[in-house]
Amino acid sequence: MTELNRTPLFAEYEKSGAKTVNFGGWEMPVQFSGIKKEHEATRMAAGLFDVSHMGEILIEGQNAERCLQKLLTNDVAKLTPKRAQYTMMCYPDGGTVDDLIVYQLAEKRYLLVVNAANREKDYQWIQENKIEGVSIKDISDQYVQLAIQGPKAESILQKMTEIDLSAIRFFRFESDVPFNDVEGTAIVARTGYTGEDGFEIYIEPGAGIQLWRKLLEEGSPDGLQPVGLGARDTLRFEANLALYGQELSSEITPIEAGLGFAVKTEKEADFIGKDVLKKQKEDGPPRKLVGLEMIDKGIPRTGYAVFAGEEEIGFITTGTQSPTLKKNIGLALIRASHATQGEEVYVQVRKRLLKAKVVPTPFYKKS
Amino acid sequence: MSLPKELRYSEEHEWVKVEGEKVRIGITDHAQSELGDIVFVELPEVGDTIEADEPFGSVESVKTVSELYAPINGKVVEVNEDLDDSPEFVNESPYEKAWMIVVETEDLSQVDELMSADQYQEMIDEE
């Protein structure tokens, strides 16, 4: 077996009692104090996440915008410096290469933050499809990425910087943000993957370690806890935020996954996958991602088959017992003809078919 | 890590306790700690038979499903229905409140083939 990658924060995990697992080739903390506790801390107070395994790709040059307009489904022309956008990168058949956030750092200069497991594939894809006048660099190793999420995220982070964080609105960011007792500066964006308010922070590795320590120190009186990938998954799932490899894949289009808002088929530029995605948007996709709530006792899990009567109509993409709602719920990609609220379907849990019904998503919305 | 001396242990992390002619079965403290927060326990019904090394139910944490493997052959005579509403007992009290099933067996000598607490400890130390 090849050696697992470790983020610069690895040595810090142990101090907080983490259990680590292999996540897409990275030895990452799955939990610290326990998934349910960490989940609750993030919903009630704040959670601190090391997500340095995410990839960062820098795209710059005269034709950077044109290049991204071709590669990405959202409309990059709507960005201005210090704004970010959630977007997809698709194949010609509409299948998804990756879902990512694009940050416009400056004129003709963009940062793409991509999924860890897709980093090399994305870089290759971008190289193969780039146009003249653009330079592309994988700069993932230059950054530690921390996320602080939860209702107290802003007040905790504010204790550590003179910059007015309340001025950074949703999907905006500030560059060169200094933190007390931390060397260097960071990019601080009001984005996240939990359904809570909060920030994602990009910072040079040494400074990132200092920031992690200081945040835990300053934040723990307010309930800040380190959070692992286990709770990150339950948090994002309740908020209906897609996970590549489950809700999205090369076999699943963003329209099927209910992410049409990030696919601007009306934008002028032709982008890869536009024909198929436009048609799906207009005619409706063959399959749709829906929320399911179990009626019978049992927990839906990734990959379980979904039936209507005798007929298999799809599969569960993610499922668990929701720590916030205490209900057994799942997301399922099913034939569009069955994707109506209240429709009863069956989930195959091991050898048994258990009854469930289609319910609205997101399962959780912050108040 | 709690590991009562009077119990016997299987390689699949079940404990068994002989009570006269019957045998009580649950999962170990080590197992619950590895699994994390248990949110669902699926058990057989009274009258079902279980077969050594075959699955007889499952425990689910927030993240995963794990099968429960029968440590011995037997017939289920009692099922812990409290675990339906309180699966967290498995985390809180794996040897007491979270017993899972009681079986009757014709051959109690099967229990002797299971590990002692010391042998089980040795096994998990090697993992």
Image: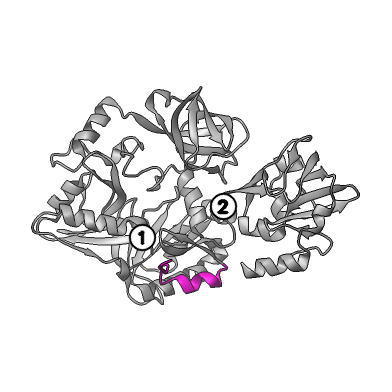
Mark 2 neighbour density, 10 Å: few (under 14) some (14–19) many (20 or more): some
Pick the front one: A88 or A334: A334
User: Which residue: 57% across, 36% down?
Assistant: A349
User: Which residue: 79% across, 40% down?
Assistant: B75
Chain at tag 1: A
Q: The residue under label 2 is which amino acid type?
A: Glu
The quarter holding residue A126 reads bottom left
The Cα atoms of the two marked residues, 1 and 2, are separated by 24 Å
What residue sits right under mark 2 in the picture? A40
Q: Which residues are magenta?
A: A1-17
The quarter holding residue A167 reads bottom left
Counting residues from the start of the chain, the first of labels 1 and 2 encountered is 2
The quarter holding residue B30 reads bottom right
User: Which residue: 57% across, 41% down?
Assistant: A325
Mark 1 neighbour density, 10 Å: few (under 14) some (14–19) many (20 or more): many
Q: Is residue A77 above or below residue A21?
A: above
